[in-house]
Image (cartoon, helix red, strand yellow):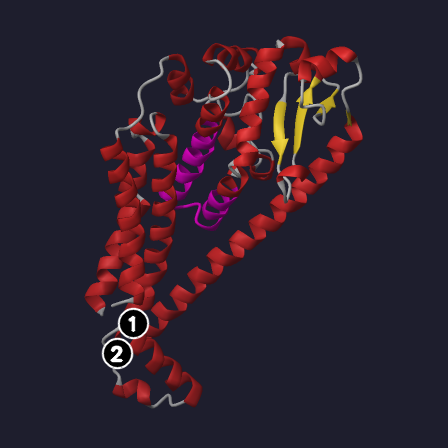
Amino acid sequence: MEPLALFLAILAAALAVPVPKLLHQARFRARSPWAAMLLWQAIALAGGLSLIGAPLIFGLSPFGDSPLDATITAVSLVTTEDLSALDEHNVHPVHLFALCLAVLLAGHLLLTLARTYLRVLSARRRHRQLVHLLSTPPESGADVRQLGPLTEAHIIEHDAPLAYCLPGRTHASSVTVLSRGLLEQLTREELAAVVAHERTHLQQRHHLLTMAFEAWYRALPWLPTTRYGREAVLELTEMLADDGALREHTRDDLLRSLALSTPESSTESASQSAPAETLAATPGATGVLITTARLQRLLVPRPGLSRSSLAGVVLLALGLLAVPTGLILLS
């Protein structure tokens, strides 16, 4: 099984550096954000499986000709405490080290995901409490008329233009937060476009994607793929939310709302400096993620990918997932 382990190691290296760098710069992401998002998820899962599978398969190689047989043999030796059989199987310290490395990597990824999830939930709970303390419901007739059906929105008495969503366990428990400055600067149509953008974040559960890739980055911050993936997912979720808003509102209303509600300090690197818990707990915060690619696709819309191109992306994503999974489980 050593050739199999070598192949998985090569695949892990490819998905760690060159592939994410190419996808991060790919122009088609602005034409079909969901296709790019699908590829990023496939790269993350396939990369993680390959990274764990390579040392696992190498460590099991002395115990059998297939991963399943080798696992059964190794488990039986451990349960019977027949350590003398290790010499019969030509097990060397490097094989034991590889097995320990695979277990540690898997445990590190799972524990980091759980830790990130708990930290995000805690940050979101604290943020929700602050919103309830500092915000007010629409009081004046002008507020109600401007918000329309969104009378459950929380309004913060602050001059800075601000709009974001706080996801809940259910859609009904989610909260949309608007600032007084935003209400004063936008017309009803422009405000409706902003609200539709935030609702798309909630409906498509973008906070789960950003949280997963944030955990991936925290677990392996030294890998280029985790940094590229984190940045890409933050940008792609904004593009997807823009598309959701454009299904109900005009492009001009959305562009004007972004132009009027984006602070001058907002830059393409703002997402890198914002606190991780804030980004994961409040997806879609206005003025944080106005990237060049996002702005260009709004100003100069281009047609989406053809059906054949989309089919190719889907097949590529399925292939990326199938290869390491099949090699580990079915070899």
* Residue 232 spot, x, y in % from top left: 41, 34
Q: Mark 2: give few (<14), some (14-19) or many (20+) Cα within 10 Å.
A: some
Q: Please say if the residues under marks 1 and 2 sit with CB atoms less than 8 Å apart.
A: yes
Residue at point 50% right, 22% down? 245
Residue 180 is inside the magenta segment: no
The amino acid at mark 1 is Pro
Task: Name the residue type under label 2.
Answer: Gly
The answer to which of 12 and 45 lies nearer the viewer is 45
**Quadrant where the image shows the N terminus:** bottom left
What stretch of residues is rendered in magenta?
Answer: 211-238
132 relative position to 233: left or right: right
Q: Is residue 324 above or below residue 164?
A: below
The secondary structure that dominates the magenta segment is helix
Q: Is residue 300 above or below residue 121?
A: above
| Displayed quadrant of residue 316 | top left
Determine the image quadrant of residue 63: bottom left
Residue at label 1?
67
Where residue 35 appears, as percent x and y from the top left, is: 34, 35
- Helix, strand or loop under label 1: helix
Residue occupying the point 30% across, 64% down: 328
Q: Residue furthest left?
A: 3
Q: Which residue is mark 2?
A: 64
Residue 62, relative to residue 263: is it above or below? Answer: below
